[in-house]
Amino acid sequence: MKEVRRLTIEEMVGQLFLLGFQGAAPDAETLALLHRVRPGGFIFLQRNIENFDQFVALTDSLREPFGVPAILAIDQEGGYVDRLKHLFNPIPAIGTLAAHGTAHVRAAARAIGSQLEALGLNLCLGPVVDLHDSRSVMAGRTLADAPAEVSRLAAAFIDELSKKNILSCIKHFPGMGAADRDPHFVLPRIEKSKRQLQQEDVLPFLDLLDESAMIMTSHVHYPGFGDDKPTPASLSTRVIEGYLRKKLGFAGVIVTDDLTMGAISAIGLTPELFLRAFEAGNDMLLFSQTTPLVEQAFRLIVRATRQSDSLRTRLEQSVCRIMALKTRIEFVPLRYRANARARINRQIEKLRQPLDHPVHREQQHLTHTVQKPLG
């Protein structure tokens, strides 16, 4: 792997980008853009997956495309955020599993780790450590409502992933458990004071600072942190550089949530917005598309860092963190990949068995009836 001091500015700026693309493989136009930007990694969605062998071949082709190991990431949580349900048996929602205790959470994480290992991926964009609130858009994706319990269960999840050489990314800082609107469409606003956030939502992140490889920032506005204008945390210098980096002392990689989301596009998705996200303190810019906007943003950040010594220093710091993370990536091809799917499906079926019991289904029905939000 190249040393940071040997990278050109263009190569360093490329490392900031975590990109997605359409289809089962990049087309010629996308490949040309990727070779110009040389991104630090890729995020995969269901649109990239046709079958097991195709997807393994895809991750193999992108493992080290530009002379530097690539981050190969996926959101894999179970429930309705199960990107791999067309390749493996579906994994139950993590909240349902957490209600049955740590052993079920560990079993789910083992299955997810095995899935990612078999497919050649190296980063799970999870676990979610937002606090549970039955009225929230996050309700089905959260582990618990008590910060200490979230920390404990998330630590178990991260531990199981690490046994499969899978890195983890906790999300969505500083906590969006209270969000009642979906950032895929609009910019949510959480009215908690800074003190409330520190004493509740931030605690799992604080507990897991040394456990997780990355932290993802949320597309939610927190006026309690001092941003009076509608500013998502992912673009807030106060939240990222001032609080997460300096106050809490997080030394790892900070990545934005997907910048294609409505909460961001409503502000105005321009090349300048990518620069703004970087200046706010994010190390990586997640964008699940490869459009001309990506190259425009890439060239803007290159120009800006050439013109500013302070921004150049920031760039070097971010790339040092990214490259340090990449030294932890260890790819060991499975010796018996052909048998992996059957073995993982057995793991998932064993995990699901107690959940499919009639008594459990009745209890779940009663619980959901009681917790159903009004309106």
Image: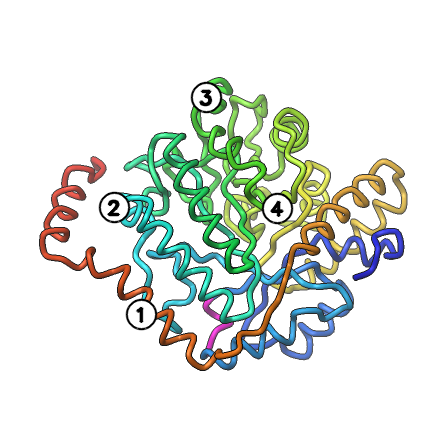
Question: Looking at the image, is mark 4 or mark 3 earlier in the sequence?
Answer: 3
3 or 1: mark nearer the eye: 1
Which residue: 78% across, 42% down?
317
Between the C-alphas of marks 1 and 2, the distance is 19 Å
Q: Earlier in the sequence, mark 1 or mark 2?
A: 2
Question: Residue 98 location, x and y as percent?
Answer: 31, 45
Q: Earlier in the sequence, mark 3 or mark 2?
A: 2
For disc 1, the marked residue is 346
**Camera-side mark, 3 or 2:** 2
Give the number of the disc on residue 255.
4
Q: Quadrant where the C terminus lies? A: top left
Kindly report which numbered mark, 1 or 4, lies closer to the viewer in this rendering: 1
Q: Does residue 188 lie above or below 323 as drawn?
A: above
Q: Identify which residue, 109 or 55, lies in the foreground.
A: 109
The amino acid type of the residue labelled 3 equals Gln
The range drawn in magenta is: 46-50
Q: Secondary structure at mark 4?
A: strand
Determine the CA span between mark 1 and mark 4. Answer: 34 Å
CA gap, disc 3 and disc 1: 41 Å
Report if residue 76 lies within the magenta region.
Answer: no
Q: Amino acid at mark 2?
A: His
Q: Tell me the kind of residue under disc 1.
A: Arg
Q: Which mark is residue 199?
A: 3
- Front of the two marks 4 and 3: 3
Is residue 272 shown left or right of residue 204?
right
Relative to residue 19, is residue 101 drawn left or right?
Answer: left
Residue 100's tag is: 2
Label 3 element class? helix
Q: Compare marks 3 and 1 and give the one earlier in the sequence.
A: 3
Q: Position of residue 62 (x, y in %)?
A: 65, 71
In this picture, is 203 found above or below 357?
above
Q: Examine the structure image and report whether residue 48 is included in the region drawn in magenta.
A: yes
